């Protein structure tokens, strides 16, 4: 059985946004509380693991984290760009980016202005995408397009299971089209970018 890399112990922190959102949707606990708790737990686990790492392992983990953040950012850009093209091109009724305002409201509260909600919600969305990328490179020894697509499929499974009921969506075919293809674009970009970046490890 293939062992997970030691850096897999660090994945809770970059997954904090996703964990917090899942806890909120399943248990009804405030996103601010669940997100904050996940950040705290992830930070604690990272600090404990970091102390046990050798200097070379710390350098490698740091590089992996940066590679994942870069790959996650590019993957998120591909994810959102493809969804935008699909919604505009196919004249879908559901605008997938409205969820950013909901994220903002859950984090900043309903009294915040619309612009503030958009900014906070968008940053949360981008942060989750980058965090998922970071977790991927820390947990996956050899990134690639296949593993990137598999990682994205796991994210898609959570989204398609939880979002329709939360958002009260009726046009599920629209959600399926944009989310499946969007996550495929995210996973492919993430895998390709991180594979290219981690190739440098052999020469660093």
Image (cartoon, rainbow, N blue to C red):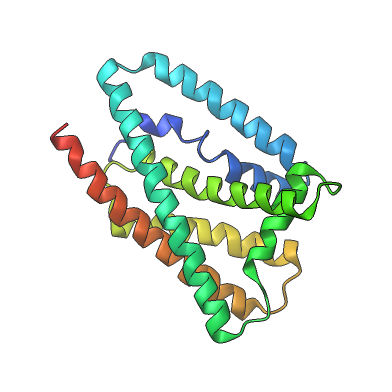
Left or right of residue 195, residue 8 in this image: right
Left or right of residue 131, residue 125 in this image: right
Q: Is residue 104 above or below residue 8?
A: below
Given residues 102 and 187, the one toward you in this image is 102
Q: Residue furthest right?
A: 111
Q: Is residue 149 visible?
A: no
Given residues 86 and 176, the one toward you in this image is 86
- Can you say which quadrant of the picture contains the C terminus? top left
Residue 68's spot in the image, x, y percent?
38, 43
- Can you say which quadrant of the picture contains the N terminus? top left
Residue name at image x 66 percent, y 72 percent: 95
Residue 173's spot in the image, x, y percent?
60, 80
Q: Is residue 194 above or below residue 77?
A: above
Q: Is residue 10 above or below residue 101?
A: above
Q: Residue furthest left?
A: 203
Residue name at image x 70 percent, y 37 percent: 34
Left or right of residue 183, residue 40 in this image: right
Residue name at image x 47 percent, y 63 percent: 79
Q: Is residue 151 above or below residue 141?
A: below
Residue 156's spot in the image, x, y percent?
52, 61
Residue 83's spot in the image, x, y percent?
52, 71
Q: Is residue 120 visible?
A: yes
Q: Quadrant of residue 53?
A: top left
Q: Quadrant of residue 201?
A: top left
Given residues 103 and 144, the one toward you in this image is 103
Residue name at image x 62 percent, y 33 percent: 38
Tally of numbered tags: 0
């Amino acid at each position: 059985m293939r062992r997970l890399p030691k850096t897999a112990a660090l994945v809770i922190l970059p997954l904090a946004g996703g964990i917090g959102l899942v806890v909120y949707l399943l248990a009804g606990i405030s996103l601010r509380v669940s997100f904050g708790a996940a950040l705290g737990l992830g930070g604690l686990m990272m600090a404990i693991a970091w102390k046990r790492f050798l200097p070379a392992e710390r350098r490698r983990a740091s590089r992996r984290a940066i590679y994942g953040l870069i790959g996650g950012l590019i993957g998120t850009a591909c994810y959102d760009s493809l969804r935008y093209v699909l919604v505009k091109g196919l004249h879908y009724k559901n605008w997938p980016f409205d969820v950013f305002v909901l994220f903002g409201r859950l984090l900043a509260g309903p009294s915040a202005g619309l612009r503030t909600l958009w900014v906070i919600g968008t940053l949360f969305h981008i942060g989750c995408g980058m965090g998922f990328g970071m977790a991927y490179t820390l947990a996956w020894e050899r990134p690639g397009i296949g593993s990137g697509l598999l990682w994205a499929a796991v994210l898609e499974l959570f989204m398609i299971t939880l979002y329709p009921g939360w958002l009260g969506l009726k046009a599920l075919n629209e959600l399926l089209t944009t989310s499946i293809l969007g996550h495929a674009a995210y996973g492919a970009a993430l895998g390709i970018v991180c594979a290219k970046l981690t190739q440098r490890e052999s020469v660093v």
